Amino acid sequence: MRHWKLLFCVVAVSLGVGCQGVVGTWTADDSSPGPNPIARVSFCPDGTFTAASMGRYGGGHTRVMSGHYTVEEGSIKLETEGQTREYQIKVAENKLILTHQGKEARMVRMKPRK
């Protein structure tokens, strides 16, 4: 089921469907002030997401998780595996900044294929 959700999101982003706000695929930006816990995340128009963490955040391996997200006035809630994590969020064109417990993760939007 996860593969179908990810495929749907990739297709939607590739076609340019709803590429406003957080919808799209984002990758870690090297300008983050510290190690970035999220290597890549895709937010789909249907409110689902798939994220991958690598390195020490993934236990030395790539860890993939899927779930649902909601965006409300400067914050985003990610719900997965019965847990909810809330981040402060800033989106400006192709830049996304997520802040959780004082730690900032910077992401850049991947460009859809033409």
Image (tube, rainbow, N blue to C red):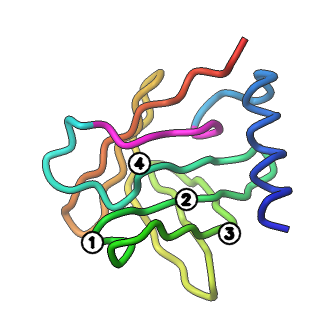
Amino acid bearing label 2: Ala
Magenta part mainly helix, strand or loop? strand
Task: Tell me what residue is drawn at x 24 percent, y 53 percent.
Answer: 104
Q: Is residue 23 left or right of residue 102?
A: right
Element carrying mark 3 = strand
Residue tagged by mark 4?
89
Give above or below for 86 relative to 114: below
Task: Tell me what residue is drawn at x 68 percent, y 27 percent.
Answer: 19
Q: Nearer the viewer, residue 74 or 62?
A: 62
To which quarter of the image does residue 50 belong?
bottom right
Q: Residue furthest front?
A: 61
Q: Which residue lies furthest to the bottom in this view?
A: 82
Give above or below for 56 relative to 50: below
Amino acid bearing label 1: Arg
**Which comes sooner in the sequence, label 4 or label 1?**
1
Residue tagged by mark 2?
51
Q: Is residue 8 left or right of residue 23?
A: right
Residue tagged by mark 1?
56
**Which comes sooner in the sequence, label 2 or label 4?**
2
* Mark 2 neighbour class, 10 Å CA radius: few under 14, some 14 to 19, many 20 or more: some
Q: Give the range drawn in magenta.
A: 22-29
Give above or below for 99 relative to 58: above
Q: Which of 56 and 51 is in front in this view?
A: 56
* Mark 1 neighbour class, 10 Å CA radius: few under 14, some 14 to 19, many 20 or more: few
Labels 2 & 1 near each other (Cβ < 8 A) = no
Element carrying mark 1 = helix
Q: Is residue 76 left or right of residue 104?
A: right
Q: Distance between the residues labelled 2 and 3?
A: 9 Å
Residue 67 marker: 3
Q: Give how far across and how far down residue 98 sits, in percent.
A: 36, 51
